[in-house]
Every structure is written in C-alpha cells, then in structure tokens.
Amino acid sequence: MDKLVIRGGNPLKGSIQVGGSKNTALPLMAAALLPDGPVTIENVPALRDINTFSRVIAVTGTRVDFQAETHTVSIDARGLDRPEAPYELVKRMRASFYMLGALLGRTGRARVSLPGGCAWGPRPVDLHIKGLEALGANIELDEGYVVASAPGGRLPGGKFRFSPSSVGATINVLLAAVSARGPSRIENAAIEPDVVEFCRMLQAMGARIQGVGTRVLEIEGVDRLKPVTYRNSPDRIELGTFMIIAAIAGAPGIPITITSADPDRLGSAFIEAFRQTGSGFEVDGSSVLVTAPEILIPVNIETGEYPGFPTDLQAQWTVLLARTTGNSKVRETIYLDRFKHIPELRRMGVNAIVVGTEVAIEGGNKIQGAKVMSTDLRASVSLVLAGLVADGETHVQRVYHLDRGYENLEGKLSNIGADIERVRYDEWADPE
Ligand code: UD1
C-alpha cells in the first residue's frame, strides 16, 4: 500500500491547478451510454473512481477508452449487450448505481447490484428506486441486485417529488426520463452544479429538459439522443480544498494562485465563510488568488444543499478551524455521522469533539505530526491538510481513499513548496 509522508511547516507559494470534476465526470460518463454512437468527454481527471466506472461501463459490452494523459474518455455504446453492473465493482464505488437509470433508459432493462453502506453511514438508495418506479419501471430485488424493466421496452414517464433532494437520485431519474415515451416532471430536484452540468450535456445530445438549475425539471422524452463531444467542468471540491490549504499553509501576505477554477460552482455559503476567516480571496478570470492572513478568524459552518456549504468540504474546514485562535462549531446536515476524521485529527493534537451532529473545535492548539489512517476520501485529505501545518512528520496511511478523488496531490503540493512524498509500506509489518 502507499502512504503520504509530510514534513509540515513549509510556507507554500506559487500556483496550483484544479483538475476536472470527479462528481460531474461520473454522470457525464453515464449519459454517454444513451446515444447510439461515440461520445467524447474532455477534462476527465485521472482518478481511481474514473477507472472503476470505466470498468463498470465496459462490463456491458460498451467500448470505453480513457486516456489519462490527455484526460479524455471516449465511450461507444453501440455494442452494449449486457445491461448489468456486478457487485464486485459497484461495492467499490456507489456512483456505479448510475448504471440503473442509464441502462433502463438505453435498453429498457437493468440488473444492478445494490451498493452497500459507506464509511459514514447507511446511505440509502430508496429515492433512486422510487423515482424510477414513478416513471413506470418495474423493480424487483434479486439476491442483492436491483432488477428493473420498462413495460414494452420503454418507460412511459411520470412525476416524482424528491424528499430530501438527492444529487444521485436526480441524476438516475433523469438518465431514464430523457428517452421515455412520454413527459416526466421532477420536483425538488437537486441543483448542485454537477446536476446542472449533466443536464447541459443531455441537452447538447438533444434531450428536452426545462427548468435546468431550478428545483422543478420538466422532461419530454425523445426517440433518440445524438453523440457529442463535451468538456467536463473544473472540480469545485478540489478548488475548495486548495483554497483552505492556501489559507492555512500559504506564506502570509503572498497570494497562492489557483488556476483552471470556477468559484461559482462552490456556492455562496463557502465563499462567504471563507472571506470571514480573514483570508484574501480574489477572482481573476479562471484563477482564484488566496492570501493567508496573519491570524485566521473562526467561522462556524453548517453543511447544506447547494448553494449551502458543501459536506465534501466539512472535514477540511475543521482543520482550518483548528488553526484559528478561538472556539468554533461545524454542523453536518447531509450525512449526520460523517466525522471519521475527528479521532485521527485528535491523534495529531487537534482538540475537537463530536456531539451529535456537531463538532466543537478549540483553536490554537499545536498540531503535531503522527501516523494516521485514511478512512474515506475527504477525511483523508483533511489529514494531509493537518500534516502540512503540523510540527514534525505525518504519515497518512491507506491513501487509496485519497486517490479516489485527488489526482497527483503530492505532485501538485510539492510544486508549491510542500515537503510531501508517496512511499510504499507494509501495513502489517512490525514496528522498527
Ligand atoms: C453526492 C456526491 C457526494 C456528496 C453528496 C452531497 C457524487 C458521486 N457524490 O452523493 O460526494 O457528498 O452528493 O452533496 O456525486 N438519500 C436518501 N435516499 C436516497 C438517496 C439519498 O435518503 O435514495 C439521502 C442521503 O442519505 C443524504 C441526502 O439524501 O442524506 C443527500 O444525498 P445525495 O445527494 O443522494 O448524495 P449522493 O448523490 O450519494
């Protein structure tokens, strides 16, 4: 296995580039199964989750060619003859469940493994299933698989109201609705930028969707969708992570330039909280300039749906709060027990405790290097952040979690002056 070894304390300077969005690329890849011809998606990050999803798609008989160097994926579903997504792959990544809507839309049939829980709780898929049933799908469970079919090979379409609103379920229902026989209406749809971009790609393929970017989507099913070449958006969570890194580890007064960024995708709550910390924040075209302040001000946050504070930046924000001089709180409203990073951060000297769905953080304590363990994607990056500002050496183990969502993080951070390297290790070896 690999770990990241970080010697903290270097003031970071220079320029760092944001890659393509993982959470947007995945539904764009699912959409590429719908037309009868080759689809090309550009600016796709070279990440473990993208490789996993490429394999999920390939199982169906679809051709998938992911060129990591050029960040381009080509998908041609003309040979799709096996509408299935097996457990062995779905268990590695929940977003594989997008195959349910994509295969139903494309072939009128799907057999997709149910994903399991995940590191921060049960994460149900009931809304995906109820939403597809509302469009007219027959759905049964068979030995851990969801088996879905459209009567007569094509869904009639229908109306569904999400409660709560769900990014993944909105995407799954749209994948099936755009080629239904009749009209559909989705109420309380997710309006996260990933959903909006996905709708734009569907529209470019000829889908008829009204209300994109709002809570109500009206869809008129079409007979066929056309192949397109589409450019994926920049990753908003990577941008937010880099902004927090610049604020806590940048040389005070000297801006770090974050390039290929789209700060509008972050939502107003994050930007507002970020400014309130006293950090400098300026937008110059597609670059964001962040200047670390002399003293960071504690800012309480509560996660929420877009444009609320993204839950995927909650763990990183906790590290920022630990670097302030006061006490503060983080409240989680989307995934109520998403706090696996707290016990590991405590091993590094961060004084934070979880009380129900909140974390109370006492700022101003020294952060010390330690051996710590990644448990999930965003928890693991928060340990890297703590390592960058810690005294001494931090070993972040099990970085395969991090590799799901951050491309070459150690290379990007080394370029701006961090002392960080990837090292192979044997997790079960006795201590030296
Ligand atoms: C996506 C993102 C994830 C992010 C999350 C919230 C991807 C691949 N993942 O996850 O990084 O943290 O949005 O922005 O894009 N829910 C149900 N039933 C369902 C589905 C969801 O009750 O069938 C609940 C969830 O438990 C959660 C809430 O709805 O409380 C929102 O989850 P959802 O938007 O579906 O998250 P994902 O799409 O899984």
Image: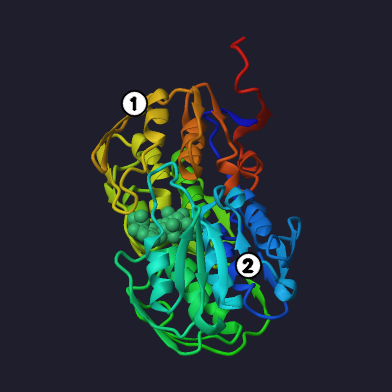
Q: Is residue 78 something one can see in this rendering?
A: yes
- Cβ of mark 1 under 8 Å from ligand 1: the answer is no
In the rendered image, the quadrant that contains the C terminus is: top right
Alpha-carbon neighbours of circle 1 within 10 Å: few (<14), some, or many (≥20)? some
Residue at mark 1? 365
Q: Give residue 202's quadrant in the image.
A: bottom right
In screen coordinates, is 195 left or right of 329?
right
Q: Secondary structure at mark 1?
A: loop
Mark 1 and mark 2: Cα distance apart in space: 54 Å
**Residue at the image point whose x is 55% and y is 60% from the top:** 112
Q: Position of residue 289 (x, y in %)?
A: 50, 55
Rendered position, 290 above or below 40: above
Q: Which quadrant of the view contains residue 54?
A: bottom right
Q: Which mark is residue 83?
A: 2
Q: Amino acid at mark 2?
A: Pro
Ligand 1: does it lie within 8 Å of the C-beta at label 2?
no
Residue drawn at (43%, 46%), measured in percent from left and top? Answer: 117
